[in-house]
Image (cartoon, rainbow, N blue to C red):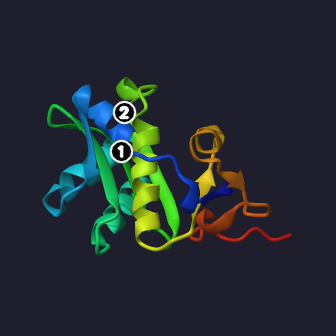
Amino acid sequence: MSDMLVKLYDLPDAAARIAALASDGIVVRLAMPYEKSHVVAWVREHFTATWADECDAAFANVPRTCFIAVERGEIVGFACHDATCRNFFGPMGVADSHRARGIGTTLLLACLQAMAAAGYAYAIIGGVRNGDIYRKAVGAVEIAGSTPGVYRDRLAPEKSS
């Protein structure tokens, strides 16, 4: 799982994608503070406890750095940035029932544009398992030598050589 790098000054605009999803009844927006427990619980239920922890950290940022996709009052996706490390995108996830509809790419672009607006020129996507979505959507490139990166298990005992 290597890290990837994205140029934030050369991103596709998210506005048209956000509008298209809205016309299909899916709203992509910044999560509100009073939604924190619900969003974090949803991430824990649909993904992992570690992603829920990162999502929780994104709510502690000022401004918040957690975006959600909502359909008829139900969360269907989320994406965060500046959670584990500054200038890092992720985690991001979309409910199985809502995949392949452009929600993940729209959440990605919403986060990356927020990072650009905050003054970053580049973003790091940490611990990528499958980089195809990032290469295709935003031209991300792998960072050589970035495995295991910041996401290595610091609680596990080190293996002796």
Above or below for 58 versus 110: below
Tell me residue 1's x, y (percent).
68, 52
Above or below for 112 versus 46: below
Which of the numbered marks, if any, corresponds to residue 15? 1
The answer to whether residue 49 is seen in the rendering is no
Question: Which of 119/111 is in front?
Answer: 119
Q: Which residue is located at x 37 percent, y 33 percent? A: 95
Q: Residues within 10 Å of mark 1 (few under 14, many from 20)?
A: few
- Amino acid type of disc 1? Ala
Q: Which residue is located at x 36 percent, y 24 percent? A: 97
Separation (CA) of disc 2 from disc 1: 22 Å
Q: Earlier in the sequence, mark 2 or mark 1?
A: 1
Question: Which of 161/72 is in front?
Answer: 72
Question: Which of 12/104 is in front?
Answer: 12
Find out whether the residues at labels 2 and 1 contact each other: C-beta distance under 8 Å. no
Local secondary structure at mark 2: loop
Above or below for 100 versus 152: above
Mark 2, residue position: 95
Question: Which of 48/15 is in front?
Answer: 15
Tell me residue 105's x, y (percent).
47, 40
